[in-house]
Image: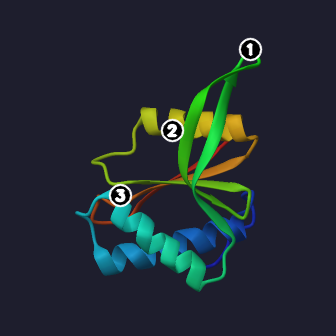
Amino acid sequence: MSVDNKYLYSASTSRIINLAIKIHKELGPGFIERIYEKALNHELIKNKIDFEKQKIIKVRYDNILLGDQRIDFLIEDKIVVELKAVSEINEIHISQMLSYLKTMSKKVGLILNFAKNKLDIKRVVL
């Protein structure tokens, strides 16, 4: 897969997407998100890609802590990755990703949906 450098973090997002495609080709659709999460965790380690899994983010409003949220992966301290096993990526998933990006002051997120016959990928940019 050639990398189109017109997008922010193209090289990194392409590597992540290629790993997700590899996982999807091997496992196929039908498993719960946790299975795909473990597979991506394994691939990131194997490929020596820096990441944090199940990273907790603090949600604040008017200088008070409202609570914690968890993201599936923060890769290279710049790309938020959320894994799904749902019939469709919808506006709620996109809004959730935008909220994560805003809260964490990050620019790029990937939503990877493994429930389809072909991996469903949504790039979200803040």
In the picture, the disc for residue 94 is 2
Q: Residue 65 occupies which quadrant of the picture?
A: top right
Write down the residue under mark 3. 33
What residue is rendered at 44% in x and 32% in y? 92
Q: What percent of the width, then of the height, locates residue 94?
A: 51, 38
- Of the 4 image quadrants, the one containing the N terminus is bottom right
Say left or right for 58 vs 81. right
Label 2 crowd bin: few (<14), some (14–19), many (20+), radius 10 Å: some
Q: Residues within 10 Å of mark 3 (few under 14, many from 20)?
A: some
Q: Secondary structure at mark 3?
A: helix
Is residue 24 visible to us here?
yes
Residue at the extreme bottom of the image, as rendered: 46
Identity of the residue drawn at 33% across and 81% down: 26
- The residue type indicated by label 2 comes to Ile
99 relative position to 19: left or right: right
Distance from disc 1 to disc 3, alpha carbons, whole Å, reads 34 Å
Q: Are marks 3 and 2 in contact (CB under 8 Å)?
A: no
Query: For this rendering, which residue is in front, 51 or 117?
Result: 51
Q: Residue furthest top?
A: 62
User: Does 86 sit above or below residue 47?
Assistant: above
Q: Residue 19 or 58: which is nearer the viewer?
A: 58
Pointer 1 and pointer 3: residues touching (CB < 8 Å)? no
Task: Give neighbour class at mark 1: few <14, some 14-19, many 20+ (Cα, 10 Å).
Answer: few
Residue ID at (53%, 75%)? 18
Residue toward you, 40 or 23: 40
Spatial CA span between label 1 and label 2: 24 Å
Kindly indicate the quadrant of the structure image that contains residue 8.
Answer: bottom right
Q: To which residue does mark 1 refer?
A: 62
